[in-house]
């Protein structure tokens, strides 16, 4: 019962990130310990009570591999977090769908890029922030967010996502979208272009593997040089 008596101002950002992460038996800032079986209840409570800005803030707390992600990105990535919680977050703070997150190699990703392999969560993100924004003022605490009907993803939404994924060179996402986009009636020319890009990416990967297999020492020094250039750019950008 103690957890339900926490006031919103008593919640800590680390509470949300620890609950969303892969940590076990994590401790809330209030002192309340939660366990894996309680995850859904705790997360619903945290999302409902947290202030909106929490869901826009990227953090490394509770996130694996040095990623700096928003709570929504963590929820999308973690298979232990249900699509229901992702849906609740989208209604609570639609803008979180469009927030960039940072990976250890300093490249940026969106929550949609992280959704590969989880069709239900991916489709919730494909609805776009504008869809959820129309319900934002009433969905949590007014019109119950669970009662809002989520329509099938439109061909226009698939086309937009495919085009943006290609521009960002998110080939795993492009591949993940292709079959459903075709079923939705996406433009054939776009689908053909996406397929060609995927084939080019596969060819580039195969070429890279060949170079590493037969030119190992040369590629080692090439990788070192790339790391130095990348580190220098990060240092100068600070």
Image: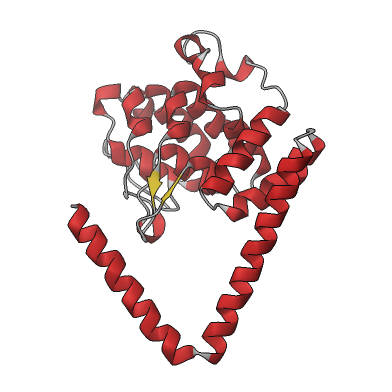
Residue 83 vertical position relative to residue 220 in the rendered view, above or below: above
Left or right: 120, with 98 as reference point: right
What percent of the width, then of the height, locates residue 56? 36, 32
Residue drawn at point x = 78 percent, y = 33 percent: 184
Left or right: 238, with 89 as reference point: left
Way the structure is coloured? secondary structure
Query: In which quadrant of the rendered image does the N terminus lie?
Result: top left
Instruction: Report the front residue among 30 and 234.
Output: 234
Instruction: Report the front residue among 176 and 75.
Output: 176
Quarter of the image where one finds residue 12: top left
Residue drawn at point x = 50 percent, y = 22 percent: 91
Residue 91 vertical position relative to residue 122 in the rendered view, above or below: above
What percent of the width, then of the height, locates residue 85? 53, 33
What percent of the width, then of the height, locates residue 48? 43, 23
What percent of the width, then of the height, locates residue 166? 58, 48
Left or right: 157, with 134 as reference point: right
The answer to whether residue 80 of the structure is visible from this angle is: no
Instruction: Report the front residue among 169 and 31.
Output: 169
Instruction: Report the front residue among 28 and 161.
Output: 161
Residue drawn at point x = 75 percent, y = 42 percent: 189
Residue 208 vertical position relative to residue 218 in the rendered view, above or below: above
The answer to whether residue 189 of the structure is visible from this angle is: yes
């Amino acid at each position: 019962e103690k957890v339900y008596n926490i006031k919103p101002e008593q919640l800590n950002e680390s509470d949300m990130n620890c609950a969303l992460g892969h940590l076990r038996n994590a401790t809330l800032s209030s002192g309340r310990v939660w366990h894996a079986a309680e995850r859904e209840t705790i997360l619903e409570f945290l999302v409902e009570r947290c202030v909106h800005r929490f869901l826009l803030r990227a953090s490394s707390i509770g996130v694996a591999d040095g990623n700096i992600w928003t709570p929504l990105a963590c929820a999308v990535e973690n298979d232990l977090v249900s699509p229901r919680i992702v849906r609740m977050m989208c209604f609570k703070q639609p803008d979180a769908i469009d927030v960039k997150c940072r990976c250890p190699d300093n490249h940026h990703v969106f929550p949609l890029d992280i959704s590969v392999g989880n069709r239900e969560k991916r489709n919730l993100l494909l609805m776009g922030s504008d869809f959820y924004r129309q319900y934002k003022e009433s969905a949590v605490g007014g019109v119950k967010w669970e009662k809002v009907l989520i329509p099938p993803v439109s061909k226009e939404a698939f086309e937009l996502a495919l085009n943006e994924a290609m521009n960002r060179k998110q080939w795993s996402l492009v591949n993940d979208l292709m079959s459903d986009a075709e079923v939705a009636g996406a433009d054939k020319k776009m689908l053909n272009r996406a397929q060609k890009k995927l084939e080019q990416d596969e060819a580039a990967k195969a070429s890279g593997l060949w170079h590493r297999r037969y030119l190992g020492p040369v590629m080692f020094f090439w990788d070192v040089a790339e790391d130095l250039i990348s580190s220098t750019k990060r240092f100068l950008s600070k």
